[in-house]
Image (spheres, rainbow, N blue to C red):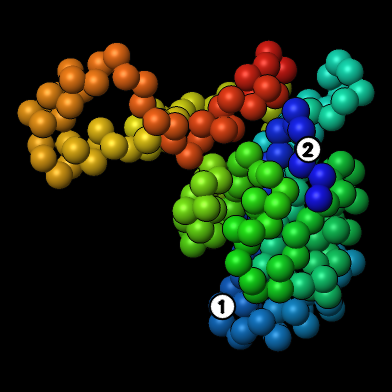
Amino acid sequence: MHKFENCLVVGISSRALFDLEEENRIFDEAGVDAYTKYQIEHENDILKPGTGFALIKALLKLNEIGSEERKTEIIVMSRNNADSSLRIFNSIRHYQLDITRAALVSGAMLAPYLEAFNTDLFLSANEEDVQEAINAGVAAGIIYTQHLTYNEIKEIDQIRIAFDGDAVLFSDESERIYKSQGIEAFQANETKNARKPLPEGPFARFFKNPVSDSESL
């Protein structure tokens, strides 16, 4: 499978990209069969943008800057199957999003697919999927969902991302010492290892990606 070298690969769940809160309610209350039936019956109804829509659109715009070489690749990651995902792809085409790849895992674990696509960052509205990605060594974050009108989706001119240090860019070893042994042990450990670089954290690979480290981001 293509590894997208020198390209920022971002996986996003369909529920983070589009407003699927009503559909998610049907899934939770009536089960997968009712959810699939609803999606098939409404496959030509265009989904409203979700809370991650503007960010993904901005990331895709990076491909319009400079050379013809792609700088970002967006992959829709979903536990859905192909039958219940037609509506998602119809919506992608409607909004003219340059997304051509997806992992539809039919209820299986997403982590192996994140690794196969060499994903730098995974965004999802599902906390379990995010934790699964982090456990697999992939940088991941939760997109909190809410109902938005299309007019509320503002264009992003510049992407700005703030990183925490401990347990994000760097490992959580110092934080674990603080929590388990207290402030004095933490300070002693920091003094002892002052010249020793901290091991990488889950977001280190994303931060070091040549695209995320460029002026275009």
Q: Residue at x 18, y 20 (%)?
A: 192
Label 2's element? loop
C-alpha distance separating marks 2 and 1: 35 Å
Left-right relation of 110 to 75:
left
Q: Position of residue 130 (x, y in %)?
A: 52, 54
The answer to whether residue 51 shows anywhere in this view is no
Q: Position of residue 24 (x, y in %)?
A: 62, 70
Closer to us: 157 or 81:
81
Left-right relation of 64 to 23:
right
Q: Which mark is residue 28?
A: 1
Q: Nearer the viewer, mark 2 or mark 1?
A: 2
Amino acid under label 1?
Asp
Amino acid under label 2?
Phe
Left-right relation of 197 to 108:
left
Residue 93 sits above or below residue 5 on the image: below
Q: Position of residue 92 (x, y in %)?
A: 84, 51
Q: Quadrant of residue 170?
A: top left
Q: Residue at x 61, y 47 (%)?
A: 122
Residue 88 sits above or below residue 61 on the image: below
Farthest residue to the left: give it: 184
Label 1's element? helix
Few, some or many C-alpha atoms within 10 Å of disc 2 (few <14, some 14-19, many ≥20)? some
Few, some or many C-alpha atoms within 10 Å of disc 1 (few <14, some 14-19, many ≥20)? few
Count numbered badges in the picture.
2
* Residue to which mark 2 is pinned: 4
- Whichever of labels 2 and 1 marks the residue nearer the N terminus, that label is 2
